[in-house]
Each structure stands twice: as C-alpha cells, then as structure tokens.
Image (cartoon, rainbow, N blue to C red):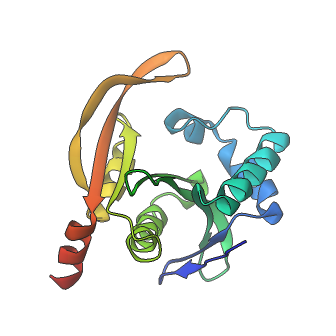
Amino acid sequence: MKTWTMESDLCQMRPLDTRDIGPITQLAGAAEIAANTFVPHPYPHDAASEFVKLCQERWIHDEAYTFAILHKPNRDFTGTIGIHLDQAHNCAFVGYWIGKPFWGRGLATAALRLIIQFGFGRLQLNRIEAGHFSDNLASGRVMQKANMRFEGVRRQSALHREHYKDVVYYAILRDDHLRDQTS
C-alpha cells in the first residue's frame, strides 16, 4: 500500500490505521460531531474498526485516501480528512471532522490546505469540492480559508437524522490553486 504523510506547522497527516480506532470512537462519538456529519451517534467501537478497515481498502484500490489529523507537537489524534476520487472526471470530494476538544485551533483549515495540495500535486486532479450543512458555518469558514470558492446551495439535498438539510458547496480548481500559489 502506498503511504503518504503530509505536514504543516500545525498538523501532521498520515493514513488511518488500527491505533486510531480508540480515538475515533471517543472523538467521533460526541453529539456535536453527529450534528454536522453522517457519523453515527452513539458511535460504537465496532463502527470505528469497520471505518478504518474500509478506509484502508479504498486506499489500496485508489478510490479514496483518508488521513488521521494529528496535532503538533504531541501528535494527538484530532480527527480525519478524506479525499474521495471521481476518476472519470478527474475530480474529488473532500470530507473531514475534528474532535470537539480541538475545535478553534485551525486544524481543519491546515488539513484541508494539505489535502488540496495533495489532490493537485500527487493526484493531479483538476477539481476538488466539499460541502457542509448550512447551519455549520464553521465548516464553511474552513473552506473559505483554504481558498475554496462558494458554488451554491442545494436546498434540502441531505436527509440527516430524519430532517432535510440544505448543503452549501465550495470548490477549487487546479487553475485557482496555481493562481493562489503565485499571488
């Protein structure tokens, strides 16, 4: 299996593995994570184990790359970020979550910037997109800080815990990214 790691001043990212099962169970199990994601609540240990296994399988088959986000300097596990490929269109969708104890530290923004560099550099993608529930404004700010551009709102496009939610979409193109790097 190809393994890539990435690093910024704030975080390090590496492929998920079995040592992440405990922290995933603990952090993803928070009601605040479930409120903004499709992560089940409560989050059973077996679900974390299956999630890690699924991520490893998708990695092997070049379908998606999911990384553990580790906070420097102690390398504390803080959450995950994944880039899910649509090879027919040379694009990808990104999803992420950060455990509540680590909110407000810039980790999601740092991780998203790294995954964008990974997508355009290593994977040679043309487009990377992401979405968030309209009531999760913090996730939208993360996307904006990573230079993603607002593309629109798909009204009631997600059925989340028996309620329809609007999803706000952002994207960045290879040309945008290159232009941002030179300015």
| Residue 146 percent location from the top left of the image | 32, 65
The residue lying at 29 percent from left, 63 percent from top is 145
| Residue 64 percent location from the top left of the image | 58, 56
Whether 7 is drawn above or below 62: the answer is below
**Nearer to me, 116 or 75:** 116
- Residue 80 appears anywhere in the view: no
Whether 148 is drawn above or below 183: the answer is above
| Residue 104 percent location from the top left of the image | 45, 60
Which quadrant does the C terminus fall into? bottom left
The residue lying at 57 percent from left, 35 percent from top is 38
Give left or right: position of 143 versus 21: left
- Residue positioned most to the front: 88
The residue lying at 82 percent from left, 61 percent from top is 18
- Residue 169 appears anywhere in the view: yes
Give left or right: position of 25 versus 152: right
- Residue positioned most to the left: 183
Which quadrant does the N terminus fall into? bottom right
The residue lying at 25 percent from left, 33 percent from top is 153
Whether 34 is drawn above or below 60: the answer is above
**Nearer to me, 150 or 122:** 122
**Which picture quadrant has residue 176?**
bottom left
**Which picture quadrant has residue 57?**
bottom right
| Residue 177 percent location from the top left of the image | 26, 71
Total marks in image: 0
Give left or right: position of 121 versus 70: left
